Amino acid sequence: MTIDDITAISSTALYLIIKISAPILLISLIVGLIISIFQTVTSIQEQTLTFVPKIICVFLSIILFGHWMMNGISEFMVSLWSDFSVYIR
């Protein structure tokens, strides 16, 4: 196994992590922004107000995107295990 193989595996893994986590992070960002705008408009200065809606939206997004996320991770692991004999050399 050469440095090029390790670099290719690492870059593929990092790209997969970014691709899989992006929808959940974007949903959390958008919900936080909407709640912050609501707090600014209504002059509510409660810091803990954003946590419950964010958690609910993150759980719902995991329910919606979980199958797609798990398929991506499974495909990556299958490709790693199928090329395992190449990595040993």
Image (cartoon, rainbow, N blue to C red):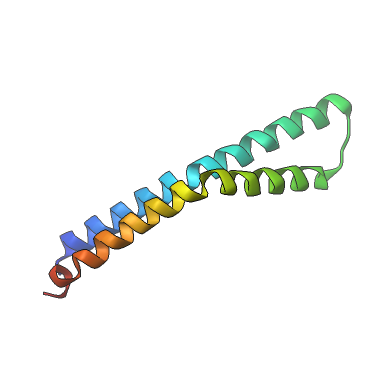
Pick out the residue farthest to the bottom.
88
In the displayed structure image, the side of residue 33 where residue 44 appears, left or right: right
In the displayed structure image, the side of residue 87 where residue 43 appears, left or right: right
In the displayed structure image, the side of residue 75 where residue 34 appears, left or right: right
Q: Quadrant of the N terminus?
A: bottom left
Residue at left 75%, top 33%?
36
The residue nearer to you, when weighing 48 against 52, is 52
Number of marks in the image? 0
The residue nearer to you, when weighing 21 against 10, is 21
Pick out the residue farthest to the left.
89
Residue 9 percent across, percent down from the top left: 26, 59
Residue 35 percent across, percent down from the top left: 75, 34
Q: Is residue 88 above or below residue 76?
A: below
Residue 43 percent across, percent down from the top left: 88, 29
Q: Is residue 4 above or below residue 37?
A: below
**Residue 27 lies in quadrant:** top right
Residue at left 39%, top 56%?
73
Q: Quadrant of the C terminus?
A: bottom left
Residue 30 percent across, percent down from the top left: 63, 33
Residue at left 87%, top 38%?
45
Residue at left 49%, top 42%?
22
The residue nearer to you, when weighing 41 against 85, is 85
**Residue 42 lies in quadrant:** top right
